[in-house]
Image (tube, grey):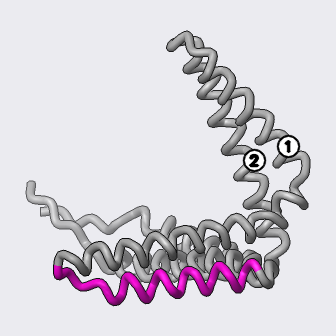
Amino acid sequence: MVALKLKNAKWNLIAGIAMIILGLLVWFNPFGTMLALAFYVGLGFLLVGAFYMMASMNVKSGWYLLVGALDVLVGLILIFNLGVTAASLPIILALWSLAVGVIQIIGAFEIKKFGFPWGWSAIMGGVGIIFGLVILAYPMVGAITISTVVGLYAIMFGILQLIEYKMSKDVVFIEAN
């Protein structure tokens, strides 16, 4: 029998520390976080547009080409106007939250007809509507909320990596010869 220690545990340690640092940076720099998210949204439009344009060659669809060109144009506008894009992200989040909240409430009453538990879904829909209205009234709350949630997730992920590092240091695999 041969005992082997887990050799790649150090990567959990490095990833954990990096994610905690990233989470703290995101947490304490909401404006920078919004600019970065704005850039990634613009980049996403550029990539999707490019894929639509490539697909239009295979499908021979002018509509795909038009959608692709529109996505590329929107992506360029978003990237070259990061401040405006970053400022609009909370409004987009608010409108999405309002729409999902309304849909959750309607869905709750739909499932109530069939005798399923519906109360929590209705409550969450109401919370979504209130959240959306608050962000529409105070868009900066949305920016802070986005950066807080992203930062908290990164910190929690980092802590999980550190826990995995600690647990994996003690793991020994036994191989039979």
Q: Does the stretch in magenta take in 8?
A: no
Mark 1 lies on a secondary structure that is helix
Residue 39 position (above or below residue 26): above
Q: Residue at x 16, y 66 (%)?
A: 174
- Density class for disc 2 (Cα within 10 Å; few <14, some 14-19, many ≥20) is many
Q: Is residue 103 left or right of residue 152?
A: left
Quadrant of residue 119 within the rendered picture: bottom left
Which amino acid, by three-letter code, is at mark 1?
Ile
- Density class for disc 1 (Cα within 10 Å; few <14, some 14-19, many ≥20) is some
The boundaries of the magenta stretch are 115-136
Image coords of residue 125 (percent x, y): 47, 81
Find the residue positioned furthest to the front.
Answer: 113
Q: Residue at x 17, y 81 (%)?
A: 115
Camera-side residue of 110 and 145: 110
- Quadrant showing the C terminus: bottom left
What label sits on residue 77 in the rendered view? 1
What label sits on residue 29 in the rendered view? none
Which amino acid, by three-letter code, is at mark 2?
Gly
Camera-side residue of 84 and 109: 109
Residue 124 position (above or below residue 100): below
